[in-house]
Each structure stands twice: as structure tokens, then as C-alpha cells.
Amino acid sequence: MADPIPYRPLAEGSQPPYDLPAYGSTHARHPKAAPLRIPQTLTEVSAPRFAPTWYAPHEDLSTVDGKAALGERIIVAGRVLDENGRPVPDAMVEIWQANAAGRYHHPRDQHDAPLDPNFLGRGRVFTDAEGNYRFTTVKPGAYPWRNHWNAWRPIHIHFGLHGAGFAQRLVTQMYFPGDPLLDLDPIYQGSGDAEARSRLVAAFDLQVTQPEWALGYRFDIVLRGRAATPFENA
């Protein structure tokens, strides 16, 4: 029997192009040759499944050894959905971000901003049976990135979503409402579709907020179809 809800392809221009002139380094990094079709072998078909049994969740980025990181504590929650709004259970969601001062805990980040010994900026969660995920972190800071003489990235959190196998990975970024840098950022503006771009911006959510402890934001992720979240590697 035919699927009663047919696949709805992406709207043209909703996903960012591989080569984006305003984002200078994309020219050197994107594929230049046509993709190769590689037959799926048993290795790909029966790829290892990502599960909490083998990949321990790390849902609280806001502390290290019980010591609180500096900055505004926040909670981020949402659902991972398919194109028809159905939940995607057991998806592994990786998170990485800069600290409250706008610096990553990485040796290549030499931005003149302080490191926080109580913030490593990386975590991992899994969706439940209804596609829900949730983690606690601190609100990241903006940082300069040398795309031009005075370029700054909006505050954002990186997301990497894994399916059943290692080759099934999608990467995107979550932004915050009201950030004045969004209009100036070629990565956020990479999607030519304003409605698609809006799906990259989290919404403040009082239901996620915990009284006297942390503001909450909701960020739902749609994996494909006409309402898909823009991805960096789609």
C-alpha cells in the first residue's frame, strides 16, 4: 500500500549551499567533484548502533566535578522529528559550544578571552521514545572569527545528530532570539529561505524554565522534508 503521507522534498534554497561567497573558507572546504556512489556492504547496513550502553550521556555541561561554570545557566530541550512530525527515538545528540566568554575549550582557539576550568563545552544526550532530549549548559558568548576585519559569530550551540550508523550524521547550529549578530552572520544567512532560517532559532519556553535556577529554551529538530532544519552537511 502506498504511503498515505508522501515525502515532501526540501524547498529550494532552504539548505545552505556548499560554496557561499560571503563565508570565505567554504570555497576551500566544499567538495569539488561529483559524489561517488558506493555500494552498501554489511558494514554499512549493520553499522554499530549508538546507545547509552556504549556512549555515556553527559547532560549537564554547566559543572565540572561539581563546580559550577561561570555564566548564565540555561536549559535546552526539544524533540527530534521526521518530516511527518513523528518522533525519532534513540537518536544520539552531541553538543559543543564556546563558554560564556566566547572561547572554546580547544588548543586551536586562541581568542583573547578567559577559559573556564569548570566548563568543557561538550555533552551528549539521547532522545527518548517520544523524541525528547534535554540538557543543561551556560549561555555561550559571541566571538570574533576573522571572516572579515570585524566579523563576530552570533551566540550559538552546535548540534551533531547520529542515526543508527556512523555515516548517518547531521550537523546544525542553534541560535538565540533577538541576537543582533544574526543579520550579519553569513553562516546563519546561508539559507536563502527566511522561514527555514527561523527554524535555527530557539524559542524561550517558560515550561522548560526552572524557577530561580535557569531559563529554558526549546529547539525542535526536523531531520528531512519541506520543514527540515537547515543542516551544514545536508
Image (cartoon, grey):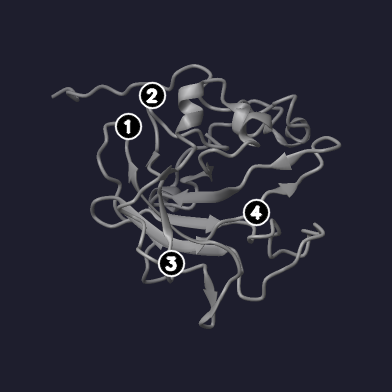
Farthest residue, direction left:
1
Query: Nearer the N terminus, badge 3 or badge 1?
Result: 3
The residue type indicated by label 2 comes to Arg
Query: Could you tell which of marks 4 and 1 lies nearer the N-terminus?
Result: 1
Residue 61 % position (x, y) = 51, 67
Q: How far apart in space, not on screen, are marks 3 and 1 (Cα)?
A: 26 Å
Which of the two marks, 4 or 1, is nearer to us in this view?
Answer: 4
Q: Earlier in the sequence, mark 4 or mark 3?
A: 3
Q: Between disc 3 and disc 2, whose residue precedes?
A: 3
Q: Do callouts 2 and 1 mark residues in contact (Cβ within 8 Å)? A: yes
According to the picture, the residue beneath numbered tag 3 turns out to be: 59
The first of marks 2 and 4 along the sequence is: 4
Mark 1: secondary structure: loop
Residue kind at label 4, given as amino acid type: Gly
| C-alpha gap between disc 3 and disc 2 | 30 Å
Question: Between tags 3 and 1, which lies in front?
Answer: 3
Label disc, if present, on residue 141 of the rendered structure: 4
The kind of secondary structure element at disc 3 is loop
